[in-house]
Amino acid sequence: MNININESKSVAFFDVDETLINMKSMFDFLQYWYQGRNEEEKLKSYMSNFKIEVKNGTSREQLNKGYYRQFKGVNYSDLVKSGEKWFSSVLDENLFINESIEALKRHQTQNIDIVFVSGSMFPLLSPIAKHLGVKHILCAPIELNSDGIVTGEIGTPQTIGNGKKEAILHFCNKKNIDPEKCYAYGDDVSDIPMMEITGHPICVGKKSNLSIHAILHGWKII
């Protein structure tokens, strides 16, 4: 997305899945995608293989690569349209995590820019961002060919784990922003790399798998 941030401001970086919304967007959308195309068997096959990969200790980076290969050959514009329809189908009073939304809106009233940082993809994050008045997204860099067709591969940095940290540092360096003046919200231990480089890390969920780390390091928990 077009980035135009006042360099004198701090920034609030938000993970999205299970930090702002009560679901994992990638999996929920994949179910929506395959069911809409009457390809439930492909969904079952993918989920079965995914569980095996997780059991075998496959890294999250590799799991993410496998996810995006499900869309090889798809016109990117179709993904964008489907993402908008998917969001409309899941939007209700239970979608958002209230404490996180309150924090996001509070930052907005303080004129602090919000940036999504997620391993999910732009077609899913964009309608969420529009709904919340968020203009800036760091997400999975989906590769397209010259005709706008998804190749099934993703570029770098992968916005998960250390990739989130790398994306944020690149963003801050490009905009001459001091990470120490920034906020970072996350719910999972995989968010630790991005959170520990900011001056204000906030753990979402008192019972999340990040909460023990947050307590040990004196991070705020909401």
Image (cartoon, helix red, strand yellow):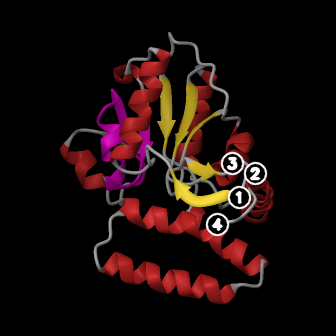
From the top left corner, tell me how far across and down residue 31 is, in percent: 65, 75
Q: Whole-Å distance between the Cαs marked 1 and 2? A: 38 Å
Q: For this rendering, which residue is in front, 79 or 118?
A: 79
| Quarter of the C terminus within the rendering | top left
Crowding at label 3, few (<14), some or many (≥20) Cα neighbours within 10 Å?
A: many
From the top left corner, tell me how far across and down residue 137 is, in percent: 59, 38
| Quarter of the N terminus within the rendering | top right
Disc 3 designates what residue? 128
- Which one is earlier in the sequence, the residue at label 1 or at label 3? 1
- Which one is earlier in the sequence, the residue at label 3 or at label 4? 4
Disc 2 designates what residue? 147
Is residue 109 visible in the rendered image? The answer is yes
- Which one is earlier in the sequence, the residue at label 1 or at label 2? 1
Is residue 23 visible in the rendered image? The answer is no
Residue at image position (68%, 86%) is 40
The secondary element bearing badge 2 is classed as loop
Q: Whole-Å distance between the Cαs marked 2 and 4? A: 15 Å
The secondary element bearing badge 4 is classed as helix
- On residue 93, the disc is 1
Crowding at label 2, few (<14), some or many (≥20) Cα neighbours within 10 Å?
A: few
Disc 4 designates what residue? 71
Image quadrant where residue 129 sits: top right
Q: Whole-Å distance between the Cαs marked 3 and 2? A: 26 Å
Which of pointers 2 and 4 indicates the residue nearer the eye? 2
